[in-house]
């Protein structure tokens, strides 16, 4: 075989190899596009809501509470009246001395400090203590220091009166706050009565109504058992007396022949 024949064979082998490689690359491209389209379709099928699409496309995921099937958010209402009923003025005094005494006095006729004297403040008009220069935010509000207003003020002064000069962050814990209010009220001769607790909701009344028959049902079987026990004693006594009566009845005929007079 000449040199030309060898070159033809090598060229055919090289062409075949190149063809196989091309087919392999072409098949990889075709199948990769097909799988990518299918996967993209799955993502769109699953990401139906706007939040899910944002999460899938931009990795900006926001958890949104669904309207159906999800647990409902129950708003907890702070019952100031119930909290005041259990408030401790002695603890409020300790909290006042720790948190408020650096700026306020509370004794009758006490001097103003960084803040006004607070004797008689509960129930008094806002920004009305003589001799103290109140901020415009507080002096322009009007109204009085009711328990509700005092509670909101002490919880977050800057939110209650925007622009107030009082830099105190507030008493965020409910027990601490109501204890201080109770202490302020104890040092306010003209303080109004504390608010009454909120009335029970219909759900609470219904729950109490359902609990009452349950107690009655619990007592009913006990009463029935006692009745059965009492009634069950009567047959026992009758059963105990029955053999004695039968014994007496049998004994009576046995004695009768002995008393008969023999006949001729």
Image: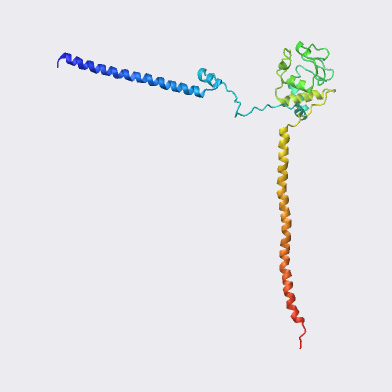
**Which of these two is toward me, 16 or 226?**
16
Compared across the picture, whether 76 is left or right of 69 comes to right
Closest to the observer: 98 or 16?
A: 16
Above or below, 11 relative to 73: above
- Residue 146 x %, y %: 79, 21
Q: Position of residue 45 (x, y in %)?
A: 50, 23
Residue at 72 percent across and 47 percent down: it is 219
Which quarter of the picture shows residue 173?
A: top right
Q: Residue at (32%, 19%) from the top-left corner? A: 23
**Displayed quadrant of residue 171:** top right
Q: Quadrant of the N terminus?
A: top left
* Point 71% across, 52% down: residue: 225
> Is residue 97 or residue 144 the one in the foreground?
144
Position of residue 85 relative to residue 166, above or below, is below
Q: How is the image coloured?
A: rainbow
* Residue at the image position 47 percent from the left and 22 percent from the top: 41
Residue 95: percent from left, percent from top: 74, 23
Q: Quadrant of the C terminus?
A: bottom right
């Amino acid at each position: 075989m000449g040199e030309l024949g060898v070159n033809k064979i090598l060229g055919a082998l090289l062409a075949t190899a190149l063809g196989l490689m091309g087919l392999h690359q072409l098949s990889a491209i075709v199948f990769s596009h097909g799988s990518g389209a299918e996967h993209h379709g799955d993502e769109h099928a699953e990401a139906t809501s706007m939040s899910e699409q944002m999460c899938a496309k931009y990795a900006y995921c926001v958890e949104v509470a669904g309207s159906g099937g999800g647990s409902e958010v129950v708003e907890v209402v702070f019952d100031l009246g119930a909290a005041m009923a259990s408030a401790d003025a002695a603890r409020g005094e300790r909290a006042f001395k720790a948190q408020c005494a650096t700026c306020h006095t509370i004794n009758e006729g006490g001097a103003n400090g960084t803040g006004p004297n607070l004797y008689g403040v509960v129930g008094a008009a806002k920004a009305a203590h003589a001799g103290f220069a109140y901020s415009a935010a507080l002096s322009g509000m009007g109204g009085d220091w009711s328990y509700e207003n005092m509670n909101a003020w002490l919880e977050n002064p800057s939110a209650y009166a925007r622009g107030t000069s009082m830099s105190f962050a507030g008493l965020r814990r409910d027990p601490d706050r109501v204890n201080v209010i109770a202490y302020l009220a104890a040092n306010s001769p003209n303080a109004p009565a504390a608010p009454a607790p909120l009335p029970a909701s219909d759900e609470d009344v219904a729950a109490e109504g359902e609990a009452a028959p349950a107690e009655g049902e619990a007592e009913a079987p006990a009463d029935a058992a006692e009745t059965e026990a009492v009634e069950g004693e009567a047959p026992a006594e009758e059963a105990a007396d029955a053999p004695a009566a039968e014994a007496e009845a049998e004994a009576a005929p046995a004695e009768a022949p002995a008393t008969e007079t023999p006949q001729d």
